Image: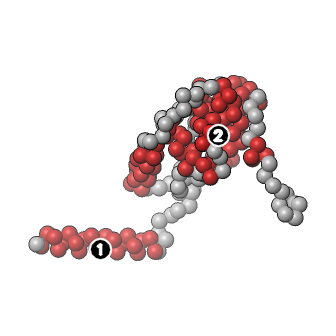
Amino acid sequence: MKVVKSSVVLAVLFVAGLGIYVLLGAYSIGADVPHSGLVFSLLSTVRDRGVSAGARAISVPADLDSPQRLSDGAGQYAAMCSQCHLAPGYESSEIWKGLYPQPPRLARVIDLTPAEVFWVVKHGLKFSGMPAWGKSHSDAEIWDITAFVLKLPHLTAAQYKDVVAHAPPDTDMMTMPAPADGKQ
């Protein structure tokens, strides 16, 4: 019985201490200060398990490698993703340098399944800066982006530039309405 009481007291003290720590704002949340190893590990595990669980029921379309998907995805990627995730031949960007955690350089390696890439693009990732593009893009458009992202590590810088130059533009990004007062 003493062990149970001691365990309860320790648990209450831990929760109270954690609460005080949070309320005092003692944990730095600035993007220029890395997480502790324990926090980084915990957040990485939560992210990886959440993406895996979210992607389980997703069916990958058979035409993922179609030239049309890749071309359409190239325009979307260049407009929406390349500043954060970079492109072949780019080692950094102004935005990429300031993000924490730094987004994966998708031109180097992708360690996610097609369903996982689709899920991340559609739903985004909390506390990472990764937006939920499913709020503004159809599933078909997200599959186009997914197809291109999966092809990206196999492209040279010249191939990337060529495919983007010949891709249809990301029209929804180009047709953003002007502010009501006519100023931009």
**Number of numbered discs present?**
2
Q: Residue at x 75, y 47 (%)?
A: 173
Q: Residue at x 44, y 70 (%)?
A: 22
Q: Which residue carries the number 1 mark? A: 13
Q: Residues within 10 Å of mark 1 (few under 14, many from 20)?
A: few
Residue 1 circle label:
none
Where is residue 5 shown, x and y percent of the image? 17, 74
Q: Quadrant of the N terminus?
A: bottom left
**Which of pointers 1 and 2 indicates the residue nearer the eye?**
2
Report if residue 93 is visible in the image: no
Residue most extreme to the right: 182
Q: Residue at x 76, y 34 (%)?
A: 168
Q: Which residue carries the number 2 mark? A: 141
* Figure check: 68 above or below 80: above
Secondary structure of residue under mark 2: helix
Q: Nearer the viewer, residue 147 or 41?
A: 147
Where is residue 162 shown, x and y percent of the image? 74, 26
Where is residue 107 shown, x and y percent of the image? 60, 33
Report if residue 80 is visible in the image: yes
* Figure check: 12 above or below 115: below
Q: Are marks 1 and 2 in contact (CB under 8 Å)?
A: no
* Figure check: 99 above or below 12: above
* Upstream in sequence: badge 1 or badge 2: 1
Residues under labels 1 and 2: Cα distance? 50 Å
Secondary structure of residue under mark 1: helix
Identity, as a three-letter code, of the amino acid under mark 1: Leu
Q: Residue at x 42, y 56 (%)?
A: 39
Left or right: where does residue 3 sit relative to residue 157?
left
* Figure check: 131 above or below 29: above
Q: Nearer the viewer, residue 148 or 154?
A: 148
Where is residue 183 shown, x and y percent of the image? 87, 60
Identity, as a three-letter code, of the amino acid under mark 2: Glu
